[in-house]
Amino acid sequence: MQKIKKAIILAGGKGTRLYPVTLETPKPLLTVNKKPILNYLIEMFQRHGVEEVAVTIRPSDQKDFDWWQKRYQNDLGAVKINLVTEEEPMGTIGYWAHHLHAWTGNEPFFLTNGDELKDVDLSKMTEHHNKTGAFATIAAVEVENPSEYGVLVFDGDHIKSFLEKPENPPSKFISSGLYLIDPRVRGHVLEKVSAGQKFLMIEKDLFPKLAAEKKLAAYKSSGKWHDCGNLERWEKAIREWGA
């Protein structure tokens, strides 16, 4: 079975909903049961054969992540960690489209937000991705309160559209913020890249195009997932993740 060797973790957000905590500590480095969120993500990737991870960070957070790497590098096994400084905000897919596409090369890769706890069976997700022939696959998770998120609208194994915080959600499945990406998707944003547009959002600049072509699949994960986006949700994750 194909193994995905590389992953990108987006860790450059400001974490404004967690102010003032994130004025002192970058959100991916906040701890849940004494361990940074970032560690959980890297451990998940390692369990499924990922060998190298790029972590995109803000210049102002460089010292925090340097300290983190020195502190935890012996705990993270053989996975090679590359801290990549994003000099200006480029959205969720812009930095890859302009720079990291050369690093990921011609093979599929994982892309994930760096501020959520998730335990997805990446091996099964890869198998599902290959079976559907999709250019991108979203790890979908079922939540009790889907109206607080962007809800996925399905067409079989594929995603037809997204509904942002709907009053009457058609399903309880939302995006986990974890994706398996085929490098061919760069062709869908190449016009904007060539025009010099740096800020690109995977949710707006890529996924709608793939959905229209039936090239956007969903893998329904049964693993745990916690959004740590505000103080209440972070506290909930601390209480429930290890339970």
Image (cartoon, rainbow, N blue to C red):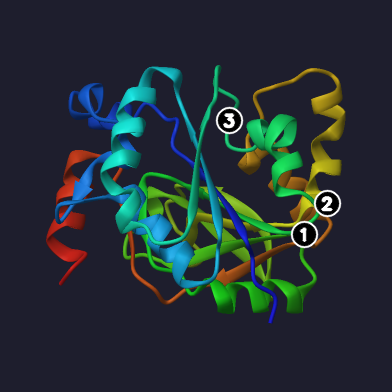
Q: Which residue lies under the disc numbered 3?
A: 91
Task: Using the numbered discs, state the Cα–Cα distance from disc 1 to disc 2 in whole angstroms.
Answer: 7 Å
Q: Is residue 62 above or below residue 73?
A: above
Q: Which residue lies under the disc numbered 2?
A: 184
Are discs 1 and 2 less than 8 Å apart at CB?
Answer: yes
Task: Using the numbered discs, state the Cα–Cα distance from disc 2 to disc 3 in whole angstroms.
Answer: 19 Å
Element at label 2: helix
Q: Residue at x 63, y 62 (%)?
A: 5
The x and y percentages for residue 18 are 24, 32
The x and y percentages for residue 123 are 57, 76
**Amino acid found under the numbered disc labelled 2:** Arg
Q: Which residue lies under the disc numbered 1?
A: 135
Q: Is residue 201 above or below residue 34?
A: above
Circle 3 Cα neighbour tier, 10 Å, few/some/many (<14 / 14–19 / ≥20):
some
Q: Residue at x 81, y 54 (%)?
A: 106
Can residue 207 be seen here? The reply is yes
Q: Quadrant of residue 159?
A: bottom right
Viewer-proximal residue among 89 and 207: 89
Q: Is residue 44 above or below residue 28?
A: below
Viewer-proximal residue among 88 and 46: 46
**Is residue 129 shown left or right of residue 83?**
right
Element at label 3: loop
Circle 1 Cα neighbour tier, 10 Å, few/some/many (<14 / 14–19 / ≥20):
many
* First along the sequence among labels 2 and 3: 3
Q: Residue at x 80, y 71 (%)?
A: 133
Q: Residue furthest bottom?
A: 1
